Amino acid sequence: MKITFMGAGSTVFARNVIGDCMCSEVLRDSVFALYDIDGDRLKESQTILEAMRQAKGGHGRIECYLGVEQRKEALRGASFVVNAIQVGLYDPCTIIDFEVPKKYGLRQTIGDTLGIGGIMRALRTIPVMADFARDMEEVCPDALFLNYTNPMAMLSGYMQRYTGIRTVGLCHSVQVCSENLLKNLGMEDKLEGHKELIAGINHMAWLLELKDKNGVDLYPAIKEKVAEKLADPDFCDKVRLDYIRLFGYYCTESSEHNAEYNMFYIKSRYPQLIQRYNIPLDEYPRRCINQIVGWKEEYAGLMKNGVKDHARTSEYASWIMESIVTGKPYQIGGNVLNEGRLITNLPADACVEVPCLVNGQGVHPCHVGALPVQCAAMNMTNINVQLLTIEAARTRKRDHIYQAAMLDPHTGSELDIDTIRLMVDDLIQAHGDFLPAFD
């Protein structure tokens, strides 16, 4: 069996996913094909993973493929393809995504999922993933594509609608949603045996039900604690708790993300909201800088002291592969096309995040029904941008980029139409060859 990792220069994440596979008796004898366009980063991942493979007993084999000319061979015969690419990296593209909008008075926190940053990231990534899909249709048409790259709904949605490749989008936030909420509120004792239902869209999937092991609804007790946390000046996860106050439900992704998915919290006319909700503007660039520095130090330490043993993580990828190979059922929260109206009050062409059963036949999304109307309405403000961005990538029409930016909740609430169009044009020019030509 062959497992191909696209964007293997993302060493920390490749180490987790491939390391998890090495922990599985079912997967450990696989060929692990590492693909990247950066030779130095690819070599670092190879060095770390080869040391880990030896520490795990020397099972399987690692192969490396560098550059577009070797991409098809990296994919040839793969049963599973894990995608973790970042087109344009932090420098220059993330810098551009943050610094150009600042000139127009638009501030962001993360900029990788929605907002003008998410739009531009999707537009430079979709053409690369379309190339992946064409190669896969030729050399591994039956492979399952496990997408971890953001913007999740836009990229996975494009693959699901416009390619023949079986695709599921995977995020880290579903697994820890209930745990984060209960720990933040001092309710850790309710974690054991708890039951939950999560559905919506990526980064804004709603914790619709949360019950303890005896079936008692935990939301009444949760809501009693929200006001206290919102009043705490040092508490940082306030936006999601405010969602409970305003909309009745908690959501999957962090407050620094959700602060920019709406028109409520980052407002130049109301700067006091930034302090009130502890919103970390320019958070993602800071993280990128810290991660770059941190990885250099960690890599030097690993080279000096050796690679430590790897314990299997809760990342979905290896568990999905194992379930499909063995037929043993496994449940995930997956990003899939809303075919058959899994969520009845969201569009059929939206990419939704719902419970999915995995078994020997693949990934099977579960029917959820209707979301609470206010939750569906919040999701739609994001879905509108997602669908228009996908359309822009598909048609190469600049008007659809303008429209996506105009309808983005944060961008549209801060800037006038003419300024939005100027900003989009400026971003397209600044990104240069990282973007295709738009009419």
Image (cartoon, rainbow, N blue to C red):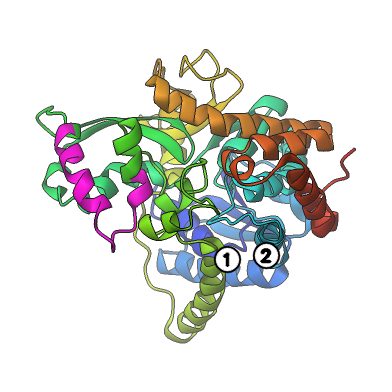
Which stretch appears magenta? 220-240
Q: Which mark is residue 56?
A: none
Above or below residue 294? Residue 88 is: above
The quadrant in which residue 243 appears is top left
Rendered residue at 38%/73% (across/down): 308
Assign the N terminus to one quadrant of the image. top right
SS under mark 1? helix
Mark 2 Cα within 10 Å, few/some/many (few <14, many 20+)?
Answer: some
- Is 226 magenta? The answer is yes
Residue that label 1 marks: 285
Q: Is residue 267 visible?
A: yes
Above or below residue 249? Residue 116 is: below
Mark 1 Cα within 10 Å, few/some/many (few <14, many 20+)?
Answer: some
Whole-percent x, y for residue 322 in the image: 42, 40
Circles 1, 2 touching at the beta carbon (< 8 Å): yes
Whole-percent x, y for residue 57 in the image: 41, 64
Rendered residue at 22%/44% (across/down): 226
Q: Is residue 72 visible?
A: no
Above or below residue 107? Residue 329 is: above
Q: Nearer the viewer, residue 169 or 186?
A: 186
- Is 155 magenta? The answer is no
Whole-percent x, y for residue 69 in the image: 82, 55
Please give left or right for residue 412 compared with residue 356 in the image: right
Q: Amino acid at mark 1?
A: Pro
Q: Amino acid at mark 2?
A: Ile
Residue that label 2 marks: 95
Please give left or right for residue 212 compared with residue 249 in the image: left
**Nearest to N terminus: mark 1 or mark 2:** 2
Per the picture, the main secondary structure of the magenta-coloured stretch is helix
The quadrant in which residue 89 appears is bottom right
